[in-house]
Image (tube, helix red, strand yellow):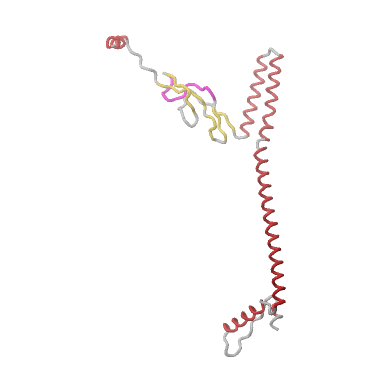
């Protein structure tokens, strides 16, 4: 009867303790009987069990190889998608710029065929304004430097130093090129000229003394 018990979901039913035996002794006997039932009792059963285990091992090996192939295919797919993403990441941005290229080409054509300079200038100004607005949509902003603004290495690059009586030393007196930020990070500082104190003018007497000493 004990061989029929493991057909039930609950396994081998626990035996009732016999008189003179505690529950621990009964559990050990049940465990011993279950262990004995797991091993074949004859050579034929052992061979059959080995064949079964070999088949299971082959099945698991095939499954492992299939999973490994699927993982490799996923890696290749992710790599292709990543390459495609970086390759066409700027597609939307480029499409937004194309109308301004068209407008500039029209402006050049108009400049060749017309003498109305004012209309051409107005058209170019509108094109530039629209271009800057489009760039702002993608986080690129142009910033101007106010004359008299204190020089900041983060936003400014000194291209020249000029003497100035109107502006304090270390302030911006001229802008050669505007700066740009991308998502609040400076990607090109503005090129500026920085003020310095004018050299002190010498009086004629002081100039004469210098000549005599020389």
> Within the magenta stretch, is there residue 57?
no
Residue at the extreme bottom: 19
What stretch of residues is rendered in magenta? 166-177
Which residue occupies the foreground of this view, 134 or 3? 3
Instruction: Tell me residue 145's x, y (percent).
Output: 51, 26
Residue at the (37%, 17%) spot, across then down? 199
Which residue occupies the foreground of this view, 150 or 85? 85
Which residue occupies the foreground of this view, 3 or 214? 3
**Is the N terminus in the top left, top right, bottom left or bottom right quadrant?**
bottom right
Q: Which quadrant of the structure image shows residue 124? A: top right
Q: In the rendered view, tell whether residue 114 sits above or below residue 8.
A: above
Instruction: Tell me residue 123's x, y (percent).
Output: 67, 20
Q: In the rendered view, tell whether residue 134 sits above or below residue 77.
A: above
Q: Which quadrant of the structure image shows residue 182? A: top right
Residue at the (66%, 49%) spot, across then down? 75
**Is the C terminus in the top left, top right, bottom left or bottom right quadrant?**
top left
């Amino acid at each position: 009867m004990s061989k029929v018990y493991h057909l039930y979901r609950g396994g081998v039913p626990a035996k009732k303790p016999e008189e003179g035996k505690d529950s621990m002794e009964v559990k050990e006997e049940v465990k011993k009987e279950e262990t004995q039932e797991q091993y074949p009792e004859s050579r034929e059963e052992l061979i059959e069990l080995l064949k079964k285990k070999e088949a299971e091992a082959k099945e698991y090996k095939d499954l492992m190889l299939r999973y490994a192939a699927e993982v490799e295919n996923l890696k290749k797919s992710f790599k292709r998608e990543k390459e495609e993403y970086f390759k066409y990441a700027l597609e939307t941005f480029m499409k937004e710029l194309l109308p301004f290229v068209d407008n500039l080409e029209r402006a050049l054509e108009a400049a060749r065929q017309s003498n109305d300079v004012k209309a051409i200038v107005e058209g170019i100004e509108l094109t530039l304004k629209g271009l800057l607005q489009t760039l702002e949509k993608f986080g690129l902003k142009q910033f101007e430097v106010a004359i008299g603004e204190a020089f900041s290495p983060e936003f400014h690059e000194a291209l020249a130093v000029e003497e100035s009586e109107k502006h304090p030393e270390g302030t911006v007196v001229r802008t050669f090129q505007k700066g740009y930020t991308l998502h609040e990070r400076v990607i090109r500082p503005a090129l500026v000229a920085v003020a310095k104190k004018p050299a002190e003018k010498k009086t004629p007497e002081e100039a004469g003394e210098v000549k005599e000493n020389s």
